Amino acid sequence: MLRYFYLTRHSFDRATDMLYWPILDLLLWGLTSAYFQSYISETDTVIFTIIAGIIFWFVVVRGQYEMSVNILEELWNRNMVNLFVSPLKFSEMIAASAIISVAKAAIGFSFAAFLAKLLFDVNLIYFGIYLFPLTLVLLMTGWVIGLFVAGTILRFGTKLQALAWTLVWVISPFSAIYYPLSILPGWGQTIAKFIPVSYVFENSRMFIMSGRVDIYELSMTILLSVIYLICALWYAHRSFAKSLEKGLVKLY
C-alpha cells in the first residue's frame, strides 16, 4: 500500500487522474443535460440520473484501473521479480490494490459529488443508506474486471495490456448507465442481466423517480457480484501460478 501511495504522490498523472476525468465528464454531460432543459419536461430528473450515472460509473472504472494497472506498472518497471523475492504474497498485493482503489474512489467520488452539487444542484446524499450497497456493487464489478485483466496479462504478457483501458468500456453499453434497459434490443437485455452494475443503474433511476429500490433485486446483484469476484480471484491466482512456472521475467 505504501508503494502505491508513494507512486501516486510522486506521479502527476496518477494524482490528477482521480479528479481530471470526473471533472471533464461532469462538465461535458452536465452541460449537455442542462441544454435539454428547454426541450423536455421533468428536466431535473433527467439531469440527476445522468450526473448520478457519471459519478457511479467512475467508481467502476477506478476499481478496475487500480487492479489491472498496478500489475502493469510492476511489469513496465520490471519490478515483479523484486517484489516476489520478498515475503510478499500475491493475495497481499491484490488486497493492497483493493484498498488503494477504495481510497481513490472515495476521493474522486466525494470531489465529483461536491462538483455536482455546486454546479448542477444535484445532491447524491439523496440516496441515503442505499448509497453504500450501490457503490459496493460498483466497486466489486470494477475489481472483477480488473482481476480478469490482471490475470490475462499475467498469463500472456504485456502484449494484451490494452485490455486495462478498454475492457471496462465493453460492458458500458449493457450497463444502462444513462438509459433504461428497455432501450436495449432483446439480445442486449439478455447480456445486461448478467452484468451486476446494470441493476445498480436501474435501481438508482428507480430511486430518483419513485424514492424506492427493489431490495430483492439489489440483494441478488450483491450475491452475483460476490460469485463473480470469487471466480475472478481464482483466475488471477491461477494465472499468477502459471506465470511463476514460466518465470516472471518472461512477462516483460
Image: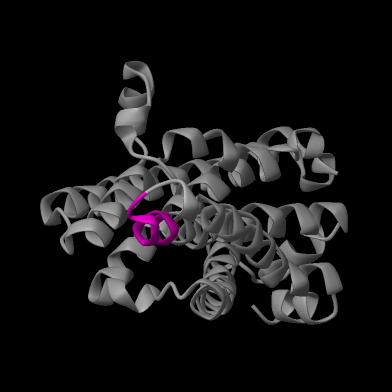
Q: Residue at x 31, y 18 (%)?
A: 186
Q: Position of residue 55 (x, y in %)?
A: 50, 63
Q: Residue at x 83, y 39 (%)?
A: 250
User: Quadrant location of the N terminus?
Assistant: bottom right
Residue placed most toward the observer, 211 or 7: 211
Taking 169 as reference, is 215 left or right? left
Q: Quadrant of the C terminus?
A: top right
Q: Residue furthest front?
A: 38
Looking at the rendering, which quadrant does residue 87 occupy?
A: bottom right
- State which region is magenta: 41-49
Q: Quadrant of residue 137?
A: bottom left
Residue drawn at the location 38% of the way across and 47% of the way down: 197
Q: Using the image as rendered, state which of residue 87 and residue 56 is in the foreground.
A: 56
Q: Name the spot of residue 174 as percent of width and height, x first.
A: 43, 33
From the viewer's perspective, is 163 left or right of 113?
right
Of 106 and 163, nearer the camera is 106
Q: Does the magenta stretch mainly form a helix, a strand or a loop?
A: helix
In the image, is residue 43 part of the stretch drawn in magenta?
yes
* Left or right of 27, for residue 120: left
Q: Position of residue 123 (x, y in %)?
A: 40, 76
